[in-house]
Image (cartoon, coloured by chain):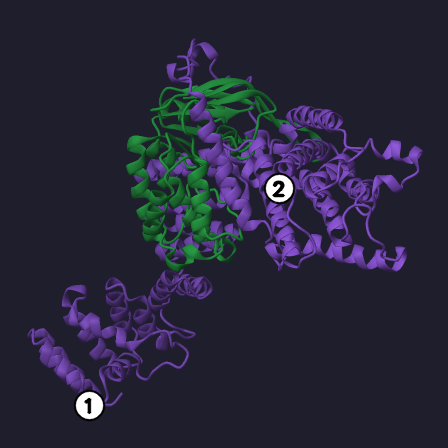
Chain colours: A purple, B green
Amino acid sequence: MTPPAANRLEAIAARLREGRAAEAERLLDGAEGFGALAAAVLLGRPPPDAPEADPAALLPLLRDPARADLDRLAAALLRIAEAPEEESPRIEAACLLLEADEPQLAEAALRPAWRRGAGSLLCRVISGVWAVLGRDLPALEAARAAAETAPGLAEYHLHHAGLLLQAEQPGAALLAAGRAIGLRPEEAVAWRQASAALLALGHTAEAIEASRRAAALSRDQAGFAEEVLVSAGAEALRRPETPAAAPSPAAAPPPAERDWPAWARPPAALPPPPRPGLRRIAAARLRVLDALMLREARTFFTDSRLGYAWALFEPLTHVFVLTVAMMFLGGGHAPLIGDSMPIFYMTGVLPYLLFCHLTEKGLDITRSGHVVLTLPDVSLFDVVASTLILRAATDAVVLVVSLAIFAALGMGGLPRDPASLALAYLLLFLLASGIAAINLALSTLSSVPEKIWPIALRALYFLSGIFYHPDIMPAAFREWVLLNPLVHVIEWVRQSYYPLYVSPYLDIPYLLRCTVAALLLGTLAAAATSRRARLAH
Amino acid sequence: MILLENVTKTYPVAGAPRRAVLRDVTMAFPHGRNIGILGGNGAGKSTLLRLIAGTEPPDQGRVRRLCRVSFPLGFTGTFHGALSGRENATFLARVYGADPDRVLDFIADFSELGPYLDMPVETYSAGMSARLAFGLTLAIDFDVYLVDEVTEVGDARFRAKSARAFRDRIGRSSLILVSHSSATIRALCDCCAILWDGALHPYETVEDGMTAYARLMGVTDA
């Protein structure tokens, strides 16, 4: 350390003592800058391995004399500057810096003196500083060095034991606490640490005993003794085979129900709950449905990069592939109805796809919806309804957009009877929802439906009159195919779309019966399995 | 008031018969009392809290909630990772019938998420999600708050702020608290119950409960 630095610091310290802070600061703004100067004074030389200690942080400290005992700090810094190898001024400076809430600087002050053979006090202080800085391993090492250098001081063992407990080394902590107790048996904190270590080691009875000693020695430890008792109970239940801590309920009978305090007794007669009006119930349901649909809409297509565009592409690719395939296979003759093959396919594919989307949703609702089902205000009905309505609304938009695209391309007109088309779609929605509910119920019982249903849907692709008209079927086969309600839906859609087509096979009462049956069955099945659906996660 | 009516709840244990958390329990949790629940690890305190919250159904019997009950404080399970903190908060506020704007104002101020509020929750650290959940629970006016253990969220300053906000809330709402720490229960509750071997044993004061609990643990003269 060069004397000029010490001189300059002395001058600065003198001015600070006299309250001439501005002048001192002007001195600091010398050629070297205060940061470099303070670092030189404080550390002898800037430590290459402690870059986090920014000496500039000393500046606000010196500006604000209230935060630190400035005289003592300046004196300690001066003594460090004069005798860098001495420990005591470093320890004093570090303690003052710690008090001023500057642990980083305290570490920088101590660090140059931390080496093999350092004094016990220095080890103890630097261990404390490191513990404050959250550097647990060096803190532990320094604490051990302190305890080994001065084995006769109980406080060092206490500090060491505390750090060992934090590091989850209860065995070593118990030893250290034991040494402290050996030196000062009346030290309550030592008993407390021994108790904590014993508890961590699983010696419940001894832990309780030690915590009682701690509580008896100092009232401050009474709360701790109680904590031990409570967590000892936790330990006991975890290891029911431990004989000391497995009291049978018969040995310590809990109070009988007649001794119950008044608050816990259910009232004999509840005041009749205020009957919320139908409107309020409906408003609450709508609120939940609305919130669910908003959430669903935001996350609907998170798996697919194309997002909502896919919803439109899917039917168009179907129509495209069907058109191309039929051109090669069947020679691309005109359809039985209308004059455009793509339009004919589209009026079949769109209802079919809606049916697929809804019924497949039913299979994974419990998987994707279980999170919101943990909210008590959200019922299974809400989740099912919001999912299906949102999916159906998406497909309805797709229908409108597809029709508009084809109309714009001049390939087909607008539907002849939009109201009838809407009605057909409504019935399709109800039918598919019923089947979705049945699927939902089945999926809570077994994973088989999840595997079988896609195959069934493939089969329906060929049995629903999507790319052919029932007219071209052999009559015997057609009788069977007409049992499929989807054929009637598609016939209905085509009848309401094409200007001159009246379906010879459309049986609306039959479709209605199927829909009502599916809805009834679905509702009952879903209600019967709703508990399983909630638990499905 | 929350009513447990003949509630039975068991859960499976690997290689053993199902373990009962509650066996045919009927008990009232009145509004206006802060109730601490004592019990060892594995006694099912957290399960009891989820039953009360309604996030899990009972095997038998029913749980009647005659007031607005919070989800367990700091519970982040209902967040959707792809949605932002703001969207998740809006969703829960709407489901619980709170005004989303007011809730969001409170959260923006309280949770200290800054620009993260508009980023997907899956980019949050555990502490940030917990802060969001904590702010959300406090922003919605529940009648009864459910607290599982001491919620350790964020740094010391945030914890102090949370504790202040929470104490402020206790003045208006009541509390059902599950904790290992008798100090926490003493500080926050005015009565308690012990969950023991499938039954709930209520006590008029925390002191009575602690004494009985110590006796139950096979320790005399606690």
Residue drawn at 40 percent across, 25 percent down: B67
Query: In screen coordinates, is A21 left or right of A143?
Result: left
- At mark 2, the secondary structure is helix
What number is the disc on residue A252? none
* Chain hosting mark 2: A
Q: Position of residue A41 (x, y in %)?
A: 25, 82
Q: How crowded is mark 2: few (under 14 residues within 10 Å), some or many (20 or more)?
A: many
Residue type, label 1: Pro
Q: Position of residue A82 (x, y in %)?
A: 23, 83
Of residue A270 and residue A158, the one placed in the foreground of this image is A270
Of residue A536 and residue B15, the one placed in the foreground of this image is A536
Which image quadrant is residue A258 in? top left
Of residue A43 and residue A486, the one placed in the foreground of this image is A486
Which image quadrant is residue A117 in? bottom left
Query: In screen coordinates, is A8 left or right of B60?
Result: left
Query: In screen coordinates, is B222 left or right of A62?
Result: right
Q: In which quarter of the image is the C terminus of chain A?
A: top right
User: Marks 2 and 1, how far apart in space?
Assistant: 85 Å
The answer to whether marks 2 and 1 mark residues whose Cβ atoms lie closer than 8 Å is no
- At mark 1, the secondary structure is helix
- A3 vs A409: above or below: below
Residue drawn at 41 percent across, 53 percent down: A162
- Which residue in the structure is indicated by mark 2? A392
- Which residue in the structure is indicated by mark 1? A4
Q: Which tag is nearer the camera, tag 2 or tag 1?
A: 2
* Chain hosting mark 1: A
Query: In screen coordinates, is A440 left or right of B167?
Result: right
Q: Position of residue B71 (x, y in %)?
A: 46, 36
Residue type, label 2: Ala
